[in-house]
Image (spheres, grey):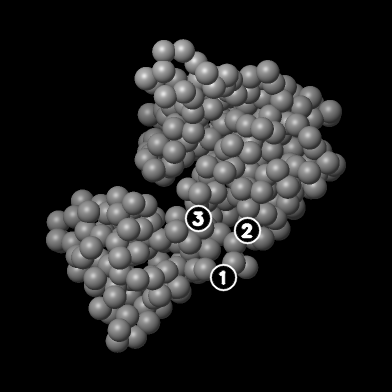
């Protein structure tokens, strides 16, 4: 997307990473029906709509009411070609039913927190702003970062920080959190950052809170659980030759996508010790990206958040 387009959108929403590469992989039938599972600021959705003919249709999903309100203004010019649902994309099957759609030509998932959510200090996603502990993508849900930090048992905090954040100081950070909350609840991101910094030497190359914040966000929003469910439901929704494209931003997500895609592309699920196949299994997809598509050097130079992004794509078999 050119600079003029970026100026028209303004500063509220950023151009997504791997933008052209994603659209090239996703939109193979301009007359088709597509689902954007992660509407955000609407850049991917608008990109899809621009590539569709008058017969084409797009259904977008997002949990965030703010994102939906913004995109209703941005995308209203597309009329009945575009519809939007406030929901979690793990319910993609329900959304497609409500939209009156049985099968679709392509599905996109851009996983993680949008730039807009990160840059909105009040949402509590970022360790760079002092705000109330929140991190909910859907503001209507009960569980927030506050409950995780102040009510989870120490061993559960250790597990979350280690598994979801790959945080090597998980035990020390969890211990400091529990020690601090005995005195008073930990209410803000600033308070949590100060606690995390105690577990790190001053020479840490990356921000000490990065991994902990990632881990708590994943727990609050059930991100990995939701992703796995959504992938399997999405493949079942695809027409033959339909494409599922997924952009991830950290190793846990990418590993999960790679594993689930490999499983869906494997026909025989029999134990390896059996000499012949007895399960009669059939592969559901063909993997189109043997290696993930990553940003160009040019994009990396323009967008610091692009560094960890990877795009993987599969095609539904008949």
* Residue 64 tag number: 2
Name the quadrant of the N terminus.
Answer: top right
Q: Which residue is mark 3?
A: 222
Residue 51 in sight here: no
Q: Residue at x 22, y 54 (%)?
A: 168
Q: Give the labeled residue for mark 1.
A: 142
Residue 129 coordinates in the image, percent (x, y): 40, 67
Whether residue 283 is situated above or below residue 91 in the rendered picture? above
Residue 44: quarter of image: top right
> How many C-alpha atoms fall within 10 Å of the one at disc 2: few (<14), some, or many (≥20)?
many
Residue drawn at point x = 57 percent, y = 38 percent: 231
Observer-side mark, 1 or 2, equals: 1
User: Residue 285 location in percent, x, y?
Assistant: 58, 23
* Image quadrant assignment for residue 196: bottom left
- Reply above or below: 100 against 185: above
Q: SS of the residue at dot 1?
A: loop
Residue drawn at 39 percent across, 76 percent down: 150
């Amino acid at each position: 997307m050119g600079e003029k387009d970026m100026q028209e959108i303004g500063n509220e929403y950023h151009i997504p990473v791997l933008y052209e590469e994603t659209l090239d992989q996703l939109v193979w039938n301009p007359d088709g029906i597509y689902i954007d599972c992660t509407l955000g600021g609407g850049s991917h959705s608008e990109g899809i709509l621009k590539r569709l003919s008058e017969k084409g249709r797009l259904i977008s999903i997002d949990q965030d009411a703010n994102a939906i309100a913004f995109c209703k203004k941005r995308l209203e010019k597309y009329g009945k070609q575009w519809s939007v649902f406030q929901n979690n994309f793990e319910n993609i099957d329900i959304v497609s039913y409500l939209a009156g759609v049985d099968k679709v030509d392509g599905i996109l998932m851009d996983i993680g927190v949008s730039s807009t959510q990160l840059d909105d200090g009040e949402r509590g996603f970022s360790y760079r702003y002092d705000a109330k502990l929140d991190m909910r993508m859907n503001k209507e849900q009960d569980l927030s970062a506050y409950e995780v930090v102040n009510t989870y048992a120490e061993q559960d905090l250790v597990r979350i920080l280690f598994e979801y954040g790959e945080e090597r100081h998980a035990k020390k950070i969890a211990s400091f959190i529990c020690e601090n909350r005995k005195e008073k609840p930990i209410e803000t991101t600033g308070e949590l950052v100060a606690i995390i910094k105690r577990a790190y030497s001053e020479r840490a190359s990356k921000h000490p809170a990065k991994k902990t914040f990632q881990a708590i966000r994943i727990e609050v929003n059930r991100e990995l659980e939701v992703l796995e469910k959504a992938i399997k439901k999405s493949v079942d929704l695809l027409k033959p030759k339909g494409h599922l494209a997924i952009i991830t931003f950290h190793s846990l997500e990418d590993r999960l996508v790679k594993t689930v895609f490999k499983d869906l592309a494997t026909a025989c699920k029999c134990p390896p010790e059996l000499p012949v196949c007895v399960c009669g299994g059939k592969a559901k997809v063909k993997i189109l990206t043997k290696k993930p598509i990553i940003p160009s050097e040019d994009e990396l130079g323009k967008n610091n958040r692009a560094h960890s992004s990877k795009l993987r794509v599969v095609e539904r078999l008949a």
